[in-house]
Structure formats: structure tokens, C-alpha cells
Image (cartoon, helix red, strand yellow):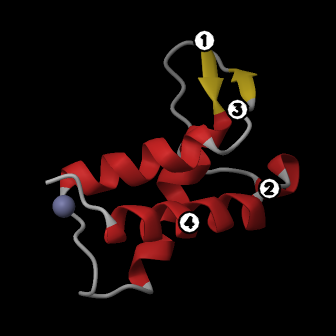
Amino acid sequence: MLHNYTETAVLQLLNEVLKNYDGSLCTCERCRQDIIALALNNLPPRYIVTDTGEIITQVSFNHFGGRAQVIAQIVKAVETVAKNPRH
Ligand SMILES: [Zn+2]
């Protein structure tokens, strides 16, 4: 099964980033999806092959090596959506 590691990384780090914005940001499902889409479009995909049914919940950043890069893109996406919410 093909899996985009970057997606797991963004989903995992998004909550961490959003903690720093307590209350000052809309975190409805629509805005979260917009943030995720923006961040993923600005990050290179990292495809890995997993066994069928295996769910990846933990990203090994030692292996992935892109934690700072992912956080930077999420922060950028959060700020773009905060300035311009689409609802
Ligand atoms: Zn919203």
C-alpha cells in the first residue's frame, strides 16, 4: 500500500502548531482542511510502501528528516488561512 509520509507528518504536527494559537484562530474542519491542503502543496511528498492495513500514526523524523520544514509550512498555511478564511 502506498502511503504519503508527508501527510502523516502534517496531520501530526498540525495539532502541535495549533496549540500555539490558542483561541486566536478558527479551527473548524473547513479551516483545518485548508491548512492541511496548503501545507501539503508546499511540501515534497515522501511515498513509502506499507503492509496492507498497517496504519502509520508515528512519523519517524530521524528517517524523514523534515520536521522543521514541515512546521514552517504549517505555520505559513495557518497564517494564510487566518488572514483569509474561506467561510
Ligand atoms: Zn473555520
Q: Earlier in the sequence, mark 2 or mark 4?
A: 2
Q: Quadrant of residue 66?
A: bottom right
Which residue position holds label 2? 66
Mark positioned earlier in the residue sequence (3 or 4): 3
Work out how far the residue at label 3 is from the one at label 1, CA to CA, in angstroms.
15 Å
Q: Is disc 1 surrounded by few (<14), some (14 to 19) or many (20+) residues within 10 Å?
A: few
Q: Residue beneath label 4, please? A: 76
Tag shown at residue 1: 1
Q: How many tags in the picture?
A: 4
The span from disc 1 to disc 2 (Cα, nearest Å) is: 22 Å
Specify whether tag 2 is near ligand 1 (CB below 8 Å). Answer: no
Q: Earlier in the sequence, mark 3 or mark 1?
A: 1
Categorize mark 2 by other alpha carbons within 10 Å: few (<14), some (14-19), many (20+). Answer: some
The residue at which mark 3 appears reads as: 45
- Label 4 neighbourhood size at 10 Å, few (<14), some (14-19), many (20+)? some
Coordinates of residue 60 in the picture (x, y in percent): 75, 52
Name the residue rendered at 75%, 60% in the picture.
69
- Residue 9 at what x, y percent from top left? 61, 50
Q: Is residue 36 above or below residue 5?
A: below
Q: CA distance from mark 3 to mark 4?
A: 18 Å
Mark nearer the N terminus (4 vs 1): 1
Q: Secondary structure at mark 1?
A: loop
Does the beta carbon of the residue at mark 4 sit less than 8 Å from ligand 1? Answer: no
Tell me the CA gap for discs 2 and 4.
16 Å
- Residue type (three-letter) at the residue carrying disc 4: Lys
Left or right of residue 37, residue 58 in this image: right
* Contact (Cβ within 8 Å) of mark 4 with mark 1: no
Quadrant of residue 61 in the image? bottom right
